[in-house]
Amino acid sequence: MLDADVTRLIVREYAHFENAAQCAAFARSAVVPERVVQTWAYSPDTHACSIVARTASKQFVYCATGFGPAFPWSVQPLGATDLGMEGLWHAYLYECVVGTELWPAVPADLLLMGPGERQPRLEFEA
């Protein structure tokens, strides 16, 4: 997937955020999508992924294979090269952002949802 395609996916994901402040919190850590190859401890397969944001200790990853396309978003320790456990992958970027230091508190009513379950809240053009 091209960097521009990943960037368009991120913009579409903003529609699932609760407010513009959450989008801005993510945008402050966003990077030009960096393609990386990740492995999975339980398979010899490799997966082409993109790091889309970084903090001092975390990297935000998009990967259309592995646990994608249903759960293509994850937050990993900085420098991780393994997909990790399936429970660490999310259907929505929003769920990654509000569960990390990018957002001051996890919303009390946060539900981790599957593909198609989270309704758009904001309007953004991709």
Image (cartoon, rainbow, N blue to C red):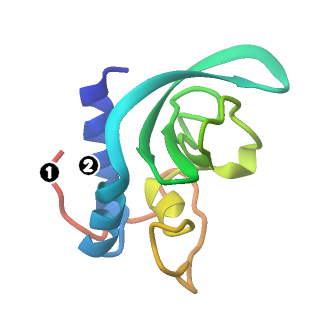
As drawn, 78 above or below 2 = below
**Residue 32 vs residue 110, the one in the foreground:** 32
Question: Does residue 40 appear to the left or right of 60 in the view shown?
Answer: right
Residue at left offset 85%, top offset 25%: 42
Residue at left offset 45%, top offset 48%: 54
> How many callouts does the rendering have?
2
Quarter of the image with the N terminus is top left
Which percent across, then down, holds residue 61? 51, 40
Which residue is under mark 2?
11
Q: Would you say residue 80 is visible in this rendering? A: yes
Which percent across, then down, holds residue 40? 75, 26
Q: Would you say residue 120 is visible in this rendering? A: no
Residue at left offset 68%, top offset 50%: 88
Which residue is under mark 1?
125
As drawn, 29 above or below 78 = below
Quick one: SS at disc 2? Answer: helix
Which corner quadrant of the image does residue 106 belong to?
bottom right
Which corner quadrant of the image does residue 27 belong to?
bottom left
Which corner quadrant of the image does residue 31 belong to?
top left
The residue at the far bottom in this view is 108
Give the Cα separation between the discs numbered 2 and 1.
7 Å
What's the residue type where badge 1 is placed?
Answer: Glu
What's the residue type where badge 2 is placed?
Answer: Val
Packing grade of label 1 (10 A; few <14, some 14-19, many >=20) is few
Packing grade of label 2 (10 A; few <14, some 14-19, many >=20) is some
Question: Does residue 94 appear to the left or right of 69 in the view shown?
Answer: left
Residue at left offset 47%, top offset 62%: 97
As drawn, 17 above or below 84 = below
Quarter of the image with the C terminus is top left
Which percent across, then down, holds residue 93? 45, 54
Answer yes or no: do the residues labelled 2 and 1 have beta carbons within 8 Å?
A: yes
